[in-house]
């Protein structure tokens, strides 16, 4: 690891690399032990060099966006976390009477992209503006809300392939599904994504965004730390409804609790550990299985287990 640290430092400089950082400071759940090395590349070249180095040296690594869909273990991550939070940039490729095409780097937050597009009068991304993740994390899992999914406006992505090549993948090639794409199953690192939007007025776009944000505040436990919906939507059911009907709202293990506002969220009500969350979600799954025969599957991604 010492050698890897020095080599990574030579790529990003010494202000963007850290050792033994607690990942709870980088996840929206505020849960997670230390990683050996945390590195923040800010250019495409740095990311490519880092990923190639880590793969060549067979170093254990994990690419992180905004950490809003992660449950990191209490013992942390034995390897290198590559955070793309500082990889920022948006570029207009096309601006006609009715079409707006933009390319966005994977570290941009969906909220920044949505607000930028609103100012430009580009419509079609409003649904994603309240999702607290990056473009990379969002595209990988086809993030969605309020009837929209990223696949609806995505044209293509540029990514580092499992073989280490920089490739372009079209919307069709990404084989999007509900909260998934081929990027979720293979070792791709997304560098940027291109979106095609329609045109509208800033006023109308902002009104839609405000409406979605109001719905979020009304329905979701936004006053507690969480990783969003804890479970995937099971075929033919709604996870939150099953959990609510099983009487599990408010069920608590340590600092982890099934939100009493929205049963689909496990929230951190104070110093929750990853073990608390696992014990709680195991209990929820067991009760729902017993009552409804439905297997709930975690949507939250486990890191370092
Ligand atoms: C309060 C709250 C509300 C939420 N609401 C929604 C919602 O409405 N809809 C929804 O879909 N989700 C929602 N989420 C979940 C989460 O925001 C999304 O899953 C988001 O897309 C995750 O993005 P991220 O950048 O935080 O990714 P991370 O959590 O950092 O990572 C998630 C996965 O993406 C991978 N990844 C990240 N960046 C890249 C990259 N550049 N290349 C390859 N892989 C990458 C990581 O390796 C990891 O496997 C919510 C979460 C919270 C906390």
Image (spheres, grey):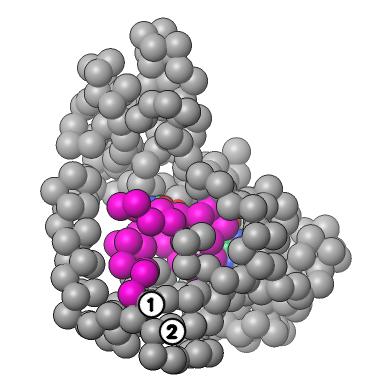
Q: Whole-Å distance between the Cαs marked 2 and 1? A: 6 Å
Q: Is residue 108 left or right of residue 256?
A: right
Q: Looking at the image, is 1 positioned above or below residue 270?
A: below
Q: Earlier in the sequence, mark 2 or mark 1?
A: 2
Q: Residue 100 bears which disc, if any? A: 2
On residue 213, the disc is none
Residue 252 placement, left or right of 281: left
Does ligand 1 reach within 8 Å of label 1's beta carbon? no
Judge whether residue 25 is colored magenta.
no
Residue marked by disc 1: 198
Task: Assign a secondary structure to mark 2.
Answer: strand
Front residue (pair 284, 116): 116
Placement of 186 over or under 203, stated as above or below: above
Q: How many marks?
A: 2
Question: For the magenta stretch, what is the residue range?
Answer: 122-150
Magenta residue check for 130? yes
Q: Check whether the beta carbons of the residues at disc 2 and disc 1 lie within 8 A of each other.
A: yes
Judging from the image, what secondary structure is the residue with disc 1 in?
A: strand
Graded by Cα atoms within 10 Å as few (under 14), some (14 to 19) or many (20 or more), the crowding at tag 1 reads some
Q: Which percent across, then down, holds residue 24?
A: 42, 54
């Amino acid at each position: 690891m010492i050698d890897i640290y020095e080599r990574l430092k030579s790529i990003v400089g010494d202000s963007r690399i850290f050792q033994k950082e607690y990942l709870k400071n980088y996840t929206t759940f505020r849960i997670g032990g230390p990683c050996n090395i945390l590195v923040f590349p800010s250019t495409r070249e740095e990311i490519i060099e880092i990923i190639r180095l880590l793969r060549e040296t067979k170093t254990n690594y994990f690419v992180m966006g905004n950490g809003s869909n992660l449950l990191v273990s209490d013992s942390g991550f034995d390897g290198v976390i590559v955070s793309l939070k500082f990889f920022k940039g948006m570029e207009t490729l096309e601006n006609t009477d009715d079409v707006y095409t933009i390319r966005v780097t994977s570290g941009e937050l969906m909220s920044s992209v949505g607000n930028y597009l609103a100012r430009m009068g580009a419509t079609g991304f409003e649904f994603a503006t309240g999702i607290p993740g990056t473009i990379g994390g969002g595209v990988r899992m086809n993030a969605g809300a309020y009837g929209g999914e990223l696949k609806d406006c995505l044209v293509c992505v540029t990514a580092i392939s499992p073989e280490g090549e920089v490739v372009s993948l079209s919307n069709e090639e990404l084989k999007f599904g509900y909260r998934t794409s081929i990027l979720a199953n293979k070792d791709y690192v997304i560098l940027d994504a291109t979106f095609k939007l329609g045109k509208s007025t800033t006023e109308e776009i902002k009104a839609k965004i405000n409406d979605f944000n109001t719905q979020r505040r009304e329905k979701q436990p936004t006053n507690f730390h969480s990783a969003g919906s804890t479970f995937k939507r099971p075929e033919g059911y709604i996870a939150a409804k099953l959990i609510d009907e099983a009487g599990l709202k408010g069920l608590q293990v340590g600092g982890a609790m099934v939100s009493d506002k929205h049963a689909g969220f496990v929230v951190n009500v104070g110093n929750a550990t990853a073990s608390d969350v696992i014990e709680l979600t195991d209990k929820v799954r067991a009760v729902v299985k017993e009552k409804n025969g439905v297997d709930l599957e975690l949507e939250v991604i486990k890191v370092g287990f």
